[in-house]
Amino acid sequence: MTDGTTGEDRGGESAGHPPDKRPRRRGRPARTTEATGPGARERILEAARTEFAERGYDKTSIRGIAKAAGVDAALVHHYFGTKDDVFAAAIEVTFEPALVVPAVLGKGTEGLGERLARYFIEVWENPATRAPLLAVMRSALTHEAAAKVLRGFVLRRLLERVAEALDVPDATFRAELAASHMIGIAMLRYVIKAEPLASADPEKIIAMVAPTLQRYLTEA
């Protein structure tokens, strides 16, 4: 005869399962404050940059980014949506257009070509930002989705803002010419590593490229 209580009533004890050996529940683990609290978005972005840099666009997944960031994949979707959106956000973190565009354009058109060339080369020369940029370039060459993200970011967030500040005919076209010039340099110097460009002094590159960018962007 029993006392009418169950194993759960007696603190969770059940036949064959003492309190400290109860079976674990299956399913998604509970999210912790550390995983979902302040800083989670930044950790996801940092993990995304690393994953894209090391694996490329094709082999990077939302699940892999989430694992590297120590969060649930649903949280990555919550903050960024699709893999393309995470990719675009990772590019933006590298370039920081909200800070860079005003710094490049804020002093007027005089010396604009030199400032733009210097910014671009310094971003590529910095090992912390070079790796994700290499992933962006390589992915864009082989994957249309990555190329679309890169085109959209460069056109909307960078070139259009530069063009808006230029009081010259065909401003957007000029900004695209400047961008194509710098992307060509990045491809030969950092991706293909063609000599002597690959080992040239960055200051020499800036000095030679700046007048051409200035002409693209400002001469009527």
Image (spheres, rainbow, N blue to C red):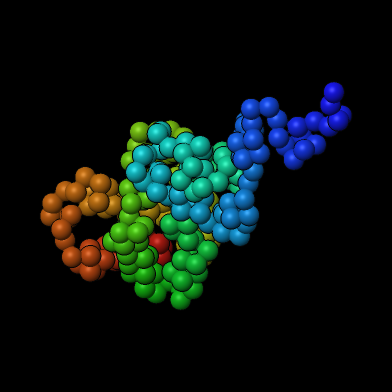
- Quadrant for residue 110, please give it: bottom left
Is any part of residue 60 visible from this angle?
A: yes
142 or 214, nearer to the observer: 142
Q: Residue at x 63, y 54 (%)?
A: 33
* Image position of 110 with respect to 46: above or below: below
9 or 152, nearer to the observer: 9
Is any part of residue 214 visible from this angle?
A: no
119 or 52, nearer to the observer: 52
Residue 44 x %, y %: 51, 50
138 or 151, nearer to the observer: 138
Residue 139 x %, y %: 37, 39
Q: Is residue 60 left or right of residue 28?
A: left
* Image position of 113 with respect to 143: above or below: below
Q: Could you tell me which quadrant the N terminus lies in?
A: top right
Residue 25 x %, y %: 64, 33
Report the residue that reaches farthest toward the left.
Answer: 196
Q: Is residue 151 left or right of residue 116?
A: right
Q: Residue at x 80, y 36 (%)?
A: 9
Q: Residue at x 61, y 60 (%)?
A: 38
Q: Could you tell me which quadrant the C terminus lies in?
A: bottom left
